[in-house]
Image (tube, grey):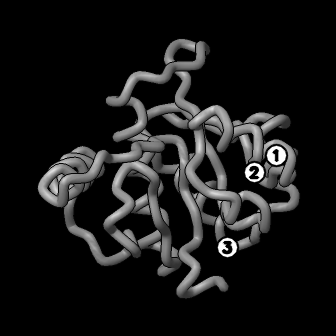
Amino acid sequence: MTFKLSKRSLERLSAVHPDLVAIVHEAIDITQYDFGVIEGVRSLARQKDLVARGLSQTLRSRHLTGHAVDLAGYHRGRLTWDWPAYYMIADAMIRAAQALDTPLRWGGAWHCLDLRDTALDAETLSSDYILRKREQGGRPFLDGPHFELPRAAYP
């Protein structure tokens, strides 16, 4: 089955870095699960609100500079927040980043600084991240919809 980005998704990509836009376009072409762009660039006011509500952890979000997108899965035309959907979307994003040789980071596996370097699937990456955080005495912050261009390659 083939999917395509909606007009709304394309509008939300309009101010996003072209390298990340290219990954999203490649991913929608190869995905096994339909998705759309729910957020690209965001204002500082929105970022402050998300931090206050515990939905983000930083005021230095890559969304502020156009280096991040949030993607949402659609099951039978309806938005879903079920993790299996986000693993499938992340798998498509990983393959797209690798095909385009563009560094990418995912909010479901923060420890992996460049998804081009992995042979693991998204579910395994996320499980590894959770285990590592717990072993370090920390609490994992999972953000399955979030993808960003890493600061090391895109300051």
Residue 127 shows in the view: yes
Residue 16 on image: x %, y %: 78, 62
Image depth: mark 3 or mark 2 in front = 2
Mark 3 highlights which residue? 19
Mark 1 highlights which residue? 12
Residue displayed at 75% across by 48% down: 47
Quadrant for the C terminus, please. bottom right
| Mark 1 secondary-structure assignment | helix
| Mark 2 secondary-structure assignment | loop
Residue 135 located left or right of residue 107:
left
Q: Earlier in the sequence, mark 1 or mark 2?
A: 1
Mark 2 highlights which residue? 40
- The answer to whether 139 is drawn above or below residue 2 in the figure is below
Residue displayed at 75% across by 51% down: 40
How many residues crowd mark 3 within 10 Å: few (<14), some (14–19), many (20+)?
some
100 or 131: which is nearer to us? 131
Q: CA distance from mark 1 to mark 3?
A: 15 Å
